[in-house]
Image: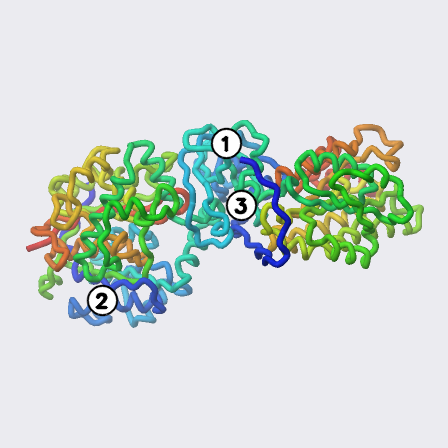
Amino acid sequence: MSTPYDGVVLTCPITVPYVRYSNETAHWWIARALRGALQAADLSPRDIDGLSVSSFTLFPDTPVGLTQHLGLSLRYLDTIPMGGASGVVAARRAARAVQAGDVDIVACVAGDANRIDSFRNLLSAFSRFSLDASYPYGFGGPNATFALIMDAYMAEYGATRDDFGRIAVAQRANALRNPQALMKKPLTLEAYLNARMISDPVGLFDCVMSCAGSEAFLVMREDEAIRRNLPFARLRGSIEAHNAFPDDPVQLRGGWARDIDALYYQAGCGPADIDLLQTYDDYPVISMMQIEDLGFCDKGDAAAFVRDHDLTIDGDFPHNTSGGQLSAGQAGAAGGYLGFVEAIRQVTGQAGPTQVADARLAMVSGFGMVNYDRGVCSAVGILEGVE
Amino acid sequence: MTLDRPKKKNPQIRTRVPTLPPGARSRAALGMAVMAAQGKFALQHCDECGAVQYPPREACAACLSSALSWKGTEPYGKLLAETRIQASPDPYFRERLPWRMGSVRLEAGPVVLAHLVGVGRGDRVKMELRLDRAGQGVMVARPVERSEDMEDDPVLRAMGTHPKHRRILISDATQPVARPLIDALMAAGADHVFAGIPEMWRRPPGMAAVEGLENVSLVPLDVTDQQGLKDAASEIGGKVDILINTARHIRPGGVMGHDTTAARDEMEVNALGLMRLAQAFGPAMAGRTADGVNASAALITILSAHALSPDPAFGAFNASQAAARSVVQTLRAEFAGAGLRVMAVYTGPTDDEWHQPLPPPKVAPKALARAIVEGLQLGHEEVFCGDVARDLAERWQQNPALLEREITGGGA
């Protein structure tokens, strides 16, 4: 069993409000989020000695360039190029470094620019296998990749578009309580079903909207957080997996499934103890897979699960409480932080209008990087708020 | 599904500017184009453990060996999932939506994403490697049994060079291959053939065989006459969808023992003639590769297989063939941006007067015609017609230096 993350905490969750299109660069967005997190902790840039960055649009820089650009002097510099799995992975690595004494305070930041042509440019050089073996077939991007996964999932488990729609509709309801969400209009199941198809069976409201934005949080020792009088969360357990089930011909399960039992064992809890779940929702089918693979229901039963549960903030299974990427927007690599930062807010009682009552234990799962025909990276963390 | 014959084009309507599907590839993935050009279904196989790899890569995903070789592979699989892409940020596909693609589990092991032609989820499919408009090798999943109108499918039509409904210019229709070529093209659904006749005023031998045919018009054309080519192009250039260069000047003999008169004529017709043809007709063709059902599609030239490595008995002629092959390679690069395919058909000794003393096997005009049309139907880029050409090509691909020794007996 993995060593507990004793004595290390997560604090100062910051979301810089998303914008559909922006001329600002990734450096600008990352600086905004970093500044927000440091201000929350009453720290100056020279007070932190660790930085973990996730971004697709820093080119020609890497996080190395950010040290001089942002005036940071560090003992720990990490880059997590794992898209939707970045938040959990950044946190668990930073937590170990702080725990081991390699570094005192790590700022974990994700942010991306989104100019009018950013998405197309990002797609066109995403990965070698995509260039060689995916884009030449209709250039549908992730929409087509997940259409194939959704098509196979529906055929295998009998899920219908109605079932996927429930996830999207519930998240929109959550987003309407989040003033920073990009989507402002209510979504009905009928509107979900009647929306135009993007890549059958993926329809318009199965897709996230790319945008610019950034997210950040700090990892430090518990005594430091207490000294600074900061509300904080503990990392009760976490796992990550990359290319977990390479022999599955179609991705009907994610890497979460591989070590989920070990995760619950490490965290000393079970699915029934989780107060809210943040899944990585670039397409509701992936959220369904997470609900299964994280142990909330049996494999293939997520459709029935979402029919039987209320996924809104006040429901019996609060899920993607800020609206998720489907309704709040996908700010590039910050999409991999969105659920994690919201979970810190939730378990520390700072979620404001989207606050789940009595939220103490949150699960966050991440999923990232379509290298060829599936998402390769996955990660899960369980966060516990401290009174 | 059958493809309707296009209506006469309204000359006032703007011709659509050609766009191409994504063409960037890793070095390893270029191997797909090499195989697709020859109509082979091949993937990387690990020399050490035998594992079949896809997408193309640098090291075996089973044992990390970097000894990977392209080998013929069982082209069957099962369609696992399918989609109809209805939105794409890529201009080429955007103009052609919806676009069907899916994932196929090959019986050889890997999962491949592929264009779909007439197949659905759960079907057993046959895979083909095809060249797309960007000139790259792509996977196509189609029914196990080829159907007659399969090539009419918009996916294959968009990437292919099928003669159906197309108008074809044959540069020298007095050659023995011309009549069987016209017949084969018509049988494949060609709309019209322009039959080029050099020195038409003197009714050259061979002209009678192509006279008076339905949907065939004779055009004065001589690949050595730059002005004449220009005139012909201004007349019919906008209606040439496929150009087949059959012009050929051949005389036996090596390099020594002659002056350079025959060699000069061979260069004039075989190498420079191809250049002149491309210069005269290429620009209009390159502008029309997205022009609907009968968009321009390909430029074809016939080469001796000894373009690869000369037969000293035809040494001067083979020099012109090697030059023409080099021209073909440059034309490929120059027309790649327009998506205009440049196809070379390599033949062994043809069964004609200039090869009269040679023993068989020789390539009959009919067989050559069939190879050209089949290559067009399947969108190939390198076609080897007849046993001699296939054998020569295989030995050349394995070891060009050894082939030279085998044919010439080596140097001093």
The tag on residue B50 is 1
* Residue type (three-letter) at the residue carrying disc 2: Ile
Mark 3 element type: loop
Q: Is residue B330 visible?
A: no
Where residue B204 appears, as percent x and y from the top left, is: 89, 43
Inter-mark Cα distance, 2 to 1: 52 Å
Q: Is residue B72 above or below residue B223?
A: above
Quadrant that contains the N terminus of chain A: top left
- B236, B257: nearer the viewer: B236
Chain bearing mark 2:
A
Q: Nearer the viewer, residue B220 or A348?
A: B220
Q: Chain of mark 1?
A: B
Gap in Å between the C-alphas at discs 3 and 1?
18 Å
Mark 3 and mark 1 lie on one chain; the one further toward the N terminus is 3
Q: Left or right of B330: which side holds A375?
A: left
- Residue A309, given in percent of the width and then of the height, sits at 16, 40
Q: Is residue A278 left or right of residue A80?
A: left
